Amino acid sequence: MDYQPYNDGGYQPLVVKPFWFKILLLLAGSLLFVILGIWLLKMSGEVTSDLAILLQTLGITCTVLFGLAAIVYLILLLRRSPLLVVDAQGIDDQSSAIPGGRLMWEDISDIRLIRYYGQLNICIFLADPKAYLSRQRGLKRWLMAINLRLAGTPVNITGQSMQLPLERVYEEMEHRRRLWAGRR
């Protein structure tokens, strides 16, 4: 990658765009599980009571969880903006259902590539995560608080819908962060 300076004296920003085909596949898979959930709910009315409770539980779980996932993938398809922009000032994360938004380098204490629950994530550790959470609203704030308890940070980036491998995105983030730190 070529690091040519641009107008604010920084370096060329990294712009990560969505991988449209992969998002379409994830949307299709989510919709199939929603259909499976609805089918399980329908089947629960035709069996004995013990099996009916199991089928209802599985049906509701499939329908709700994969229905929410389908909504997220649909939003990613409809939104035409980049998933992630990493520039001389910081990171703009719009890559998930609970995006981190604009994070300035001075607010970031560390960036780590971590695998938890079998999925690779870029965890962005903030100097003051509680202040960051206080600026969030509603469901996003609640979900980010859960992220903070589970991963130690409210901001996690997954790469499942990105055009670039997550390892490469992490390397580019770290490079730009070092460039920023060297200019201070």
Image (cartoon, helix red, strand yellow):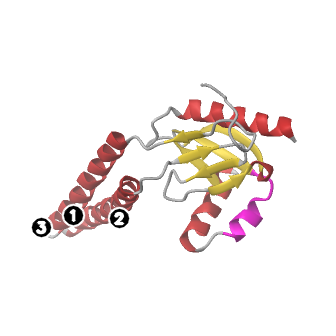
Where is residue 118? Give x, y as percent. Answer: 51, 39
The residue sitting at 69% across, 70% down in the picture is 135
* 133 in magenta: yes
Q: Main secondary structure of the magenta part?
A: helix
Rendering coords of residue 82 (x, y %): 49, 48
Residue wearing tag 3: 46
The range drawn in magenta is 126-135
Q: How many marks?
A: 3
Q: Of the residues shown, which amino acid type is indicated by label 3?
A: Glu
Q: Name which residue lies at 56% across and 67% down.
A: 140
Location of residue 35 (image quadrant): bottom left
Tell me the mark number nearer the camera, choosing from 3 and 1: 1
In the rendered structure, are the residues bearing label 2 and label 3 in contact, judged by CB atoms less than 8 Å apart? no
Query: Could you give the CA–CA distance between mark 1 and mark 2, rounded to whole angstroms?
Result: 10 Å
Name the residue furthest right: 184
Element carrying mark 1: helix
Comes first in the chain, label 1 or label 2: 1
Comes first in the chain, label 2 or label 3: 3
